[in-house]
Amino acid sequence: MIRIITRVNIFRRLRLPAILAVVAALVITACNPANFRSSAAQVSQLVLAASTDPKTFNYALIQESPNVSSFTYEGLATSNGITKEIEPGLAESWEMSEDSLRYVFTLRSGLKWSDGKPLTADDVIFSFNDIYMNKRIPTYNQDGLKIGVSKAFPEVRKLDDRRVEFVLPEPYAPFLRTIAAGIAIMPEHVLRKTVETNQSNGRPEFLSTWGVGTDPKKIIVNGPYTIDSYTPNERIIFRRNPYYWRKDAQGNQQPYIERIVWQIVESGETALMQFRSGGLDFIEIASRNFRLLKREEKKGNFTIYNAGPDSGTTFLTFNLNKGSRKGKPLVDPIKSRWFNNVAFRQAVAYALDRQAIINNTLRGLGKTQNSPVSVPSPYFLSPEEGLKVYDYNPQKAKEILLKAGFKYNSNDQLLDAEGNRVRFTLMGSAGSSRPTVTPKIQQDLGKIGIRVDLQYLDFGVLGDKISNTLDWECWYGAITGGIEPANGYNVWAVDGNFHVFNQKPQAGQAPIEGWEVSDWENKIHQLYIQGGKESDEAKRKAIYAQTQQISQENLPFIHLFNPLALAAARNTIENLKYTSIFPAPANYIWNIYEMKVNKDK
């Protein structure tokens, strides 16, 4: 499922306000993971950087990216980051019926959880029937399990201790990629009681289970690593799972690396200094730091990897929700009329100089993004194939606005037909980094007479606004992507849990009166259902091409740019296979089980 990226400006984890530079220099010695590394030099380990603390250790409740699950959990199948093929995971094999409605998975023999308990078909049944398809436990995975027009869940049945049967309500082409390889299995023997026990508020205890305050050693996992310890604002330490199922061709236990230190480094400049001083083994590269690191590549004994265009998308989106709560509109009705006018959104798109952002902010290391489908995806529709684009043209933007009934006063300020000044608030993630894109958006829209007020919010506050209170006007954000468009169903389903531009209230939230869905929203929704049913790849591509064309015409998201996925890694790391088709950290640790550290390199 699509998840929100916790750092939404393009420098992601690699920026720091100039005013903090001196402070960072003073504390760098104390927090440099090289000091931690020296105390355990005899242990094979990697020291990596995380941009933020985890919000939960409960896989089913994780909403943000990056997160710890890439280290700790696996599903029935897995995706190869290079070939993009689906490969066996916890299941050694599977069979599909001729009508594509029945899948039978056979688990590997002798699977165990990290506490040594057997992992069996009962865990698979529990994970799907009692967690992911439990309407009392809202998860991002739930939307992807509602298949077809009926939105019915698959039936999941145990055949024996190693075999599980999935019976689908109708054919679903991306089943293996989005469900078998996209959803992890969780331990019944630990979590069953939390699902069946209610809290004082009547909600399942599971919803507060395995929060970040839990003793990490009590988190039971099936992936290559367990969580050994967590020190807030400092680090997470992962230890090799002794019961992990993978072994190499010679029968040696994998993964090979004993310990992973995931250093919490919110400041990109601090992370950069730590990498350059040898404290980190790997770092994703901000465009502005590429030339510096390229010059140091040989001397620093590291290699720069270029995985091509990033799979995530950056965008500007307006709150199109026309509803009210307790008689109060979620969006000021005057502003709501602007936002819901497609001509207004198209004018904004033409007013944004995206190439200037790429040239200045990305140092040219990126491309304009025109589609909600990731560029690395085979379903991506390029402008050359007919996708509508909005090249920078402020004059055309003004003409569109005037034709739509807007007007200008003597000070070149944009007014609507009733004389209201066009002014709104653009919110973005505060983080700890100097914003660069939002001021440029503010400047560009100012050239066509629109006043934009910038608002920077903590990620938790921002997330609450876009998913719960819904009291926002405009958002500069980013979401994860991938090669399968169906993973974005929770964005494009009109009742999806991340249909962010016109969000329906989720379970347990206050109702909304007057919520409306436009024809084009319904059309995209239906096409996503159709795309899921279609098994012919050429026809699937045509269906998803149509969704991209409708999206670009109506602009629920005004897409901005796509940076190159760049990273630097120590040459001591063997078998690193950096890719852009997964969000971090999976993009660099998807094959962690076969990676090694060779200190002689």
Image: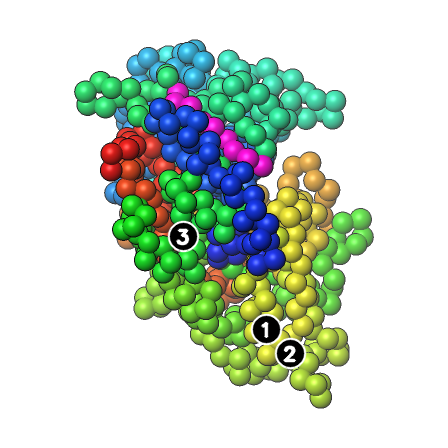
Residue 454: image location, x then y, percent: 66, 63
- Kindly state the secondary structure of the residue where label 3 is placed: loop
Q: Residues within 10 Å of mark 1 (few under 14, many from 20)?
A: some
Whether 238 is among the magenta residues is yes
**Mostly what secondary structure, the magenta segment?**
strand
- Asked if the residue at tag 1 contacts the one at tag 2, i.e. Cβ–Cβ closer than 8 Å, the answer is no
Q: Is residue 132 above or below residue 369?
A: above
Using the numbered discs, state the Cα–Cα distance from disc 2 to disc 1 in whole angstroms.
10 Å
Q: Of the residues under marks 2 and 1, which one precedes in the sequence? A: 1
Q: Bounds of the magenta span?
A: 233-241
Q: Of the residues under marks 1 and 3, which one precedes in the sequence? A: 3
- 229 left or right of 545 in image: right
Q: Which residue is mark 1?
A: 443
Q: Which residue is mark 2?
A: 449
Q: Which residue is mark 3?
A: 285
Q: Residues within 10 Å of mark 3 (few under 14, many from 20)?
A: many
Q: Quadrant of residue 588?
A: top left
Q: Quadrant of residue 386?
A: bottom left
The front one of 82 and 344 is: 82
Residue 534: image location, x then y, percent: 35, 46
Using the numbered discs, state the Cα–Cα distance from disc 3 to disc 2 in whole angstroms.
36 Å
Q: Residues within 10 Å of mark 2 (few under 14, many from 20)?
A: many
Residue 403: image location, x then y, percent: 60, 82
The quarter of the picture where the C terminus appears is top left
Whether 229 is among the magenta residues is no
Q: Residue furthest right?
A: 327
Callout 1 amino acid = Gln
Q: Is residue 506 above or below residue 396?
A: above
Callout 3 amino acid = Ile
Using the numbered discs, state the Cα–Cα distance from disc 1 to disc 3 in whole angstroms.
27 Å
